Every structure is written in C-alpha cells, then in structure tokens.
Amino acid sequence: MMEAIVLDHITKTYGKEKIPAVNDVSLTVKSGELFGLIGPDGAGKTSIFRMLTTLLLPDKGSASVNGHDIVRDYRQIRNTVGYMPGKFSLYQDLSVEENLKFFATVFGTTVEKNYDLIREIYVQIEPFRKRRAGKLSGGMKQKLALCCALIHQPEVLFLDEPTTGVDPVSRKEFWEMLQRIKKKNITIMVSTPYMDEASQCDRIALIQHGNILSVETPSAVIRAYPQQLYAIRSEDIYKLMKSLRSNPLVDSCHSFGEYLHITLSEQGMRAEAALLAGLAAEGHGNVVLKEIIPGIEDCFIRLLKN
Amino acid sequence: MINNQFLVFVKKEFAHVLRDRKTLLVLFGLPVMQILIFGFALTNEVKNASIVVLDQAKDHQSQRLIGRIGASRYFDIEGAVDDEEAIEQNLRSGKVKMALVIPSGFSYDLAHRNKAGLRIIADASDPNTANTLSNYLSSIIMDEQAELNANVPVPYTIIPEMRMLYNPQLKGVHNFVPGVMALVLMLVCVMMTAISIVREKETGTMEILLVSPFKPLLVILSKAVPYLLLSLVNVGTILLLSVFVLDLPVNGSILLLLAESTMFIITCLSIGLFISVKAQSQQTAMLISLMGMMLPTILFSGFMFPIENMPKPLQAITNIVPSRWYYIIVKSIMIKGLGFQAIWKETAILAGMAVFLTLVSLKNFKIRLE
C-alpha cells in the first residue's frame, strides 16, 4: 500500500462556539515515510493525532490509516497502530519492566517475540528495569514510552511531541532511534514544536491555527524561499532592530540569537550597499552583513506572515 | 490471549493498590478504627446510668417496674423523689441522666382501662446518651408489658410519653456492627473503584489503553476483582473484631454472611464503576462517592436513624440505598440467626441494582476521549 495515512478535508471544532482546532486539513503520508507535523503550541497537532488514533471524531471530512476509516474501522486501527501521547502516560507506580510487559500483553504479544524491534532502545534503559517509571528522567521516560508503543510491531507509529521537555542530547538520540525504526518499514508520524528537528523528516507539514501552510520535503521548503536571506548584527542589536524595522529598504526582520535575519525589498549588491551606508549614517558600529541559506524556521515565519 | 490480558490487568491493579501506602492505610485501617471507636464509645456510655423515679402510684405494678429497671445493668436507681421540682434539681446536677414518672393510679389504669401512661424525662444536653438511654428504658418497659400480657386475655398497654427508638435486642453493639460493615464496604468499594478508573483518565493512561485492542468489559472487571478480594479481607477483619473484641457472635451461617457480603460488595463496585464512567477527575469521583454514598448510608440505611420514624418521602428514598438492604441482611444473619429464605428479597434487590448499574456503566463507557 502506498498511502499509510490520508486526511481528506478534516475539520475539528471544540466547545459551543465551534472554534476550529483543525480547519479543513488534507494531507497524505506515504507508507514507510517519516512525516513531521511542525507547528507551535495550539496549532492543532494533538487534535490531528487524536483523530487519527480514533480518540476523537472529526466534525467534517474523512480520514484513514492503512486503509481503515478512522470512524467506522476504529477497532482495526487500534489493533495496528502505536501511539505515544504528548503527556507521559505510562503507569508511574509500575517498574520499567512491568510497564513493557503490561503493554505487550494488552496487545496480545510478548516482550520476547518483538524484542528485536526495541532492543536498541531498551538496552539503554535496561539497567533501570526494576525502577518505577515515575522515577525515571525525562529522556528515559520517552525511551520507555517509545518501547511500549513499539512492542506490538505497529504498522503506523504516532508520536505526539515526543521530544518536548527532553534535553538536547536525548533529543538527538531520539531522532536517531526514529531513523532506525523507519528502516524497519514502519510509517511514522511525529509532531514537534522545534523547527530544527524538521530536517530529520522525509516530509513536513507546517501547521498554524489549524491550517496546513505547506507540505514539502524539508529541502523543498527551503528551496521555495523566494528571496535572498541575510544575517546581520552590530554592537547594539536592539537599536539595530529598531532602525531596520522602520527602514523602507528592509522587507522583513526577525531576531535569531545573536543575529537578525532580514530580507530586502530590492535584490542585489546595490541594495546591500545602500542599507549598509544608511546604517553607518545612523551611527551603528561594527555592522556585519552576510548572505545565508534559510532554515526551516525562516521559511515558517515567512509562511506565517502571508 | 483474553485470559492473559485479564490476568495482567488484575496484576496491575493489585500493584496499584499494594504500592500506595496511603490507600492501604485507608483500606485496612478504616474498618478496624471504626469498629473499635463505635464499639467502645457506645458500650461505655450506656452502662450504669443514674436514674431517679417519681412514683406517684406506689402500688404493686409500679414497684415491679422499678425493680425491673434497677435490676438491669444499664441503670442504677439513684433514689426516689417526691415531686417534679426534685427531678429538675437532680437532672440539673448532671449526675442523673434520666427520670421516670409513674402517675398515680398506674395499676388501676392498667387493670381497668388496659392501658396506662408513663413519663420519661431525659437530660438531652447529650442527645446521643439521652436517645440511647430512652431506648433501653422503653425496651425494659416493653419487656414488662410483654410479661404482664402473658397471663391476661386482653392485652395491657403501657404508653411511655416519649418518642422512642426501637431497639429490640437491648444491646448497643448489635446495631452498629452491621451498620459499620455497610459503611466501610460502601466507602472502600465505591470510592476506590471510582478513583482507580478516573485516575487512568487523569494520568492519560486511558488514552493509551483506548488505542489498543482491550475490551471495556475486561478493564471494568479487572478493576473490580482486586477490590472484591480486599473487601472480603475487610469483612473478615470486622467479623473477627466483633466476635473476639466486642463479644458479638455470628448467630447465623458465616458462609451465608460472606456470600451476602460478596453480593453487597459487587453492588458497591458497580456503583463505583458507574461514578467513574461519569466523573472526569479524581476529586469529583471522591466527592460524589462521599456525598452520594457515605451520607445516604449513614442517614438512610436505618443504622443511625430508624426508617420507621422517617416521613414517608424519606422512607421511599431509603429503598434505593443499597446499604439499607445489606443492613437488614447482616442483622438477620448475625443477630437473629436467620437463613437465606428470610433475606432472599433483599438479596434479589442488591443483585438487581448491581446488574442494572453494570449494564449502564458498560453502555456509558466512553470508547473515545469525548
């Protein structure tokens, strides 16, 4: 099967006011793909996950997972997917080992049968197998939760913000694990608010206020950036930002760590020189301007503005 | 596979209970504490209460009655007084808890009109003691009346001028052991099951369980099994305490009592399940369990306040309180020593409630998050 997940004009609203959390979303995830839903908190990522895992019913539209309709065939979906909710949701008073065994049995399998699938992850938490899940560190909790979601060899894996609240090293390890799982031909849909993780995905959907802004490969998203992007800094970055934002030559200006990322309303060397001359006249010292390749975050910010 | 799943669920539930020290303390400490507090509080306060008698009749019947009261181990006759003023003085001193006024012509009234009045004045500054004492005094008067009636064709009636509680066994412990059993089982089973399911919702584990092949019935049953077993341990503890510490024997069949207790526990578990299906947070579940279950059990089971004395609408409400029926069952088996034929109706009512609530819970069990 080519399409593992299909959303067809899905809308989900909450409350009496019918505020849409997911607004007419359509997208397709191919079988074996590592697909990322990228967007800030409250963009509707969790709602999409809960609809696909049959926990919520859509108001409008239809969706399917591995060909099973999310409303009609919810039992088949529940048998064949792995789901890791955003909040750590294992039994805190059971040990690592007990949690894993419990979920294996619930899915009608055993830890031994599918040990190969989780071995690489499980060996990292195995020294703590007698420890209660509630007493694990954030990174280890995520690893255990991933083991539990994988133990029945799901066809599709749903991971809702698996790296939120996890330290950078564990985050990196986690994404390496996802790459290995992907090789075992498991379709993975993962959400994250961190733009830097997007490049790890085969394709990403940028989502904001329940609307999909774009669905592309990370490199295509970057290639689609229409203008030259510059990074600029000076000795007083705050003052620099204020004057850039009021400068008619500057199209956009956003703060990125020690640099400001800007685009110009006109392209070419002449515009660059005009900008630098203007800044010097305004008394900015040590101005550094360089051309850069945009990151996912730059693209996302540009899409949001439109 | 289903068996395996069920076992692993039950094992998990046991782990939840046994690893939580606070839960364990409530589970096993509560019954022991209640039995001991109720037992000693009640038995101590009713022995050898002082009473004064104003005997305006001074005849054969009145002497017999006074003699009988004096012979009971619940009352000490402090003395005879001559007028009402003396009664008040005595009561005001605080030492005397109660006064009995036998009007002149007591024997004459009984013999000629077949009924006679009495007046009981109690020190109601401590209403519980006053209640208990008037209970006992009226029981003694009933005994006297029954004895008199054994030899006459037209029954005599002695009418004490006081609203009285009905306590045929004349022993404080009797009433409260069945009551405490109902109360403890109700609390433990309803609250613990309700909380345990709602906890899965609150901590998010229900979200994972829903996205798995599990069956709602399986979860519900596996939640019920550990609490059923633990509650039976509680029943055993209460019975052991009542037999060995409070000297209250089980007159009927112990097996029948255990079987009926199991039935009641199942009813309570089904109430707990029903609450848990409806409640969204552990606090709500606990509040509903306490307000909705403990209060009605205390108020409407007949354990604290006799149902016969309630206004009709309240009497109707007592019918839907499961502990009311269990209270009758335990009293019948433990104290009256009756068999199943005497309590099958109550058993059937409990079973009906359990089946109804389980079905409603299953029907309302949410297979999604909304």
Image: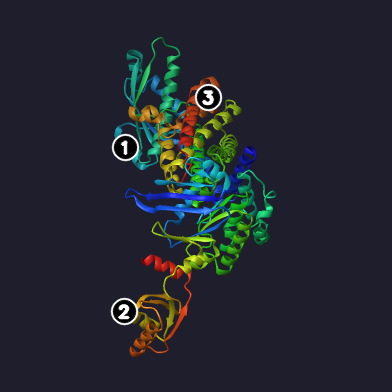
- Horizontal and vertical percent for residue B346? 48, 25
**Quarter of the figure that contains the N terminus of chain B:** top right
Please name the amino acid that badge 3 sits on.
Lys
Q: Residue furthest top?
A: B153
Residue that label 3 marks: B336
- Horizontal and vertical percent for residue A265? 35, 76
Please name the amino acid that badge 1 sits on.
Glu
Front-most of residues B88 and B226: B226
Proximity of marks 2 and 1: CB atoms separated by less than 8 Å: no
- Indicate which disc residue B282 carries: none
Q: Is residue A304 above or below residue B157?
A: below
Mark 2 crowd level (few <14, some 14–19, many ≥20, 10 Å Cα)? few
Q: Secondary structure at mark 1?
A: helix
Could you tell me how far apart the alpha carbons at marks 3 and 2 are, in whole angstroms? Answer: 98 Å
User: How many numbered dots are placed on residues in this image?
Assistant: 3
Instruction: Report the residue at 47% width, 66% height from top.
Output: A221
Please name the amino acid that badge 2 sits on.
Pro
Instruction: Report the residue at 44% width, 18% height from top.
Output: B146
Residue A181 visible, this orientation: yes
Could you tell me how far apart the alpha carbons at marks 3 and 1 are, in whole angstroms? Answer: 40 Å
Residue that label 2 marks: A248
Instruction: Report the residue at 33% width, 13% height from top.
Output: B112
In the picture provided, is A69 more to the left or to the right than A265?
A: right
In the picture provided, is A250 more to the left or to the right than A200?
A: left
Residue that label 1 marks: B88
Could you tell me how far apart the alpha carbons at marks 2 and 1 are, in whole angstroms? Answer: 102 Å
